[in-house]
Image (cartoon, grey):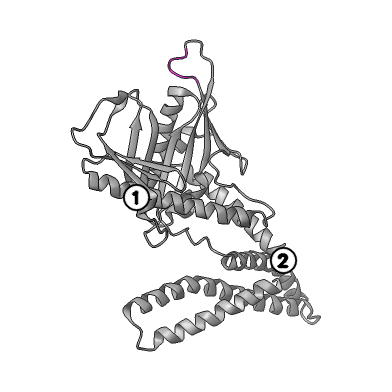
């Protein structure tokens, strides 16, 4: 293992021993005990992988010694046969330990806000945006996540101009963060008499959910407008000024919430989305600086980057970042096969980060 990774490993093992001693003692307060216990639990999985690696190294040394024995040809042949598989196992274990040592994305454990918007393609794009939104809703249900719709702007023909939701659960942002970007659809619209395939698009943004402590927002930087909520076609759906529009003056970000009948609830939801968007802007700036130092990258998370094509006539979905194509578009759209794409992207990201560390 590379010297810097070995050094990092020794640091983690020392920290693990310190935490074990601290937790076995007394005098820790509830909050401090919970914090140290969480850190200890996270390090335990790394220590387990290190223990397995150490045992494998010992077995390899023992097998190597056996192959040098001239007295027992049968034992020597058996040891040589096992030696190759042990070397392969050792490489796998070393890779696992290296992955454990990679810096974690601090936002991976956060919940997320997902925003889907119709792009180029008119009503067909709006229909596709609605299908994408429902795909993520089904996927969340399959993973046992809570999916709370924050805002829906419908076209009146079944499509969504834009829609957003809060997704709560385990590893939400970790699994969804690479969904940000342009999703392209190719199919024959129902209104197309000539049977020609049309191409349209929708954009997806996945934001790590930010808490108040993460982003400081000064009240004087906000302009808050209230108005009556409207439905498809512009008709009023509420007789009170319950809809809220918040403009963040320094950045020009605008958030509108009108789904709730309570102005107070709409304002709270709008602030939640605004915090997450501001936090994402800071995150993107940090990631861009880091990306310049990396050899390769799965995706920037930029909404202008075309990441995936859904071709309905041929029943296929292609992710352009990892060149994976699945001929099961129905299962992808139902959320069932989405993990196959996400797992491939996460594997590629881990490989890229590992290559950057080793290089």
Neighbours of disc 2 within 10 Å: few (<14), some (14-19), many (20+): few
* Label ID, residue 271: 1
| Residue 189 sits inside the magenta stretch | yes
- Where residue 213 sits, quadrant-wise, is bottom left
Task: Tell me which segment is drawn in magenta.
Answer: 188-192
From the top left corner, tell me how far across and down residue 85 is, in percent.
Answer: 68, 65
**Foreground pick, 161 / 246:** 246
From the top left corner, tell me how far across and down residue 133 is, in percent.
Answer: 40, 37
* Label ID, residue 84: 2
- Where residue 137 sits, quadrant-wise, is top left
Residue found 22% across the figure and 37% down from its top: 241
* Label ID, residue 255: none
- Which of discs 1 and 2 lies nearer the camera? The answer is 1
Confirm whether residue 334 shows in the render: no
Work out which quarter of the rendered image holds the C terminus and state it.
bottom right
Work out which quarter of the rendered image holds the N terminus and state it.
bottom right
Residue 81, above or below 151: below
Confirm whether residue 128 shows in the render: yes
Give the CA separation, mark 1 to mark 2: 58 Å
From the top left corner, tell me how far across and down residue 62 is, in percent.
Answer: 69, 79
From the top left corner, tell me how far across and down residue 258 is, in percent.
Answer: 28, 38
Query: Quick check: 304 left or right of 231?
Result: right
Residue 2, above or below 329: below
Residue found 56% across the figure and 38% down from its top: 304
Describe the element under mark 2 as helix, strand or loop: helix
Residue 112, above or below 92: above
Residue found 40% across the figure and 30% down from its top: 161
């Amino acid at each position: 293992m590379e010297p810097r990774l070995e050094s990092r490993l020794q640091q983690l093992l020392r920290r693990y021993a310190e935490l074990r001693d601290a937790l076995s003692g007394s005098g820790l307060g509830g909050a401090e005990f919970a914090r140290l216990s969480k850190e200890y639990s996270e390090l335990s999985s790394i220590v387990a992988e290190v223990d397995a690696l150490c045992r494998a190294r010992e077995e390899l040394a023992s097998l190597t010694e056996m192959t040098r024995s001239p007295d027992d040809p049968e034992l020597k042949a058996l040891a040589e046969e096992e030696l190759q598989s042990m070397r392969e196992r050792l490489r796998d274990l070393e890779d696992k330990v290296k992955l454990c040592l990679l810096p974690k994305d601090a936002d991976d454990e956060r919940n997320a806000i997902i925003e889907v918007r119709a792009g180029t393609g008119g009503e067909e794009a709006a229909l596709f945006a609605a299908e994408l939104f429902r795909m993520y809703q089904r996927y969340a249900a399959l993973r046992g996540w809570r999916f709370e719709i924050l805002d829906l702007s419908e076209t009146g023909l079944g499509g969504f101009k834009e829609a957003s939701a809060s997704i709560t659960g385990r590893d939400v942002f970790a699994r969804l963060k690479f969904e940000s970007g342009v999703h392209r659809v190719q199919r024959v619209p129902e209104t197309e008499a000539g049977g020609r395939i049309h191409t349209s698009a929708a954009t997806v943004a996945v934001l790590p959910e930010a808490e108040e402590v993460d982003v400081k927002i000064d009240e004087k930087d906000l302009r808050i407008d209230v108005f009556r909520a409207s439905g498809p076609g512009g008709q009023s759906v509420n007789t009170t000024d319950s809809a809220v529009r918040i403009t963040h003056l320094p950045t020009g970000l605008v958030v509108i919430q009108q789904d709730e009948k309570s102005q107070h609830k709409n304002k709270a939801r709008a602030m939640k989305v605004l915090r997450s968007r501001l936090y994402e802007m800071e995150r993107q700036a940090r990631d861009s600086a880091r990306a310049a130092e990396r050899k390769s990258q799965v995706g920037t998370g930029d909404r202008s980057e075309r990441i995936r094509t859904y071709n309905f006539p041929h029943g296929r979905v292609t992710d352009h970042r990892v060149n994976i194509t699945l001929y099961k578009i129905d299962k992808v759209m139902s959320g069932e096969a989405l993990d196959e794409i996400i797992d491939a992207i996460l594997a590629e990201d881990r490989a890229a980060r590992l290559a950057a560390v080793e290089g």
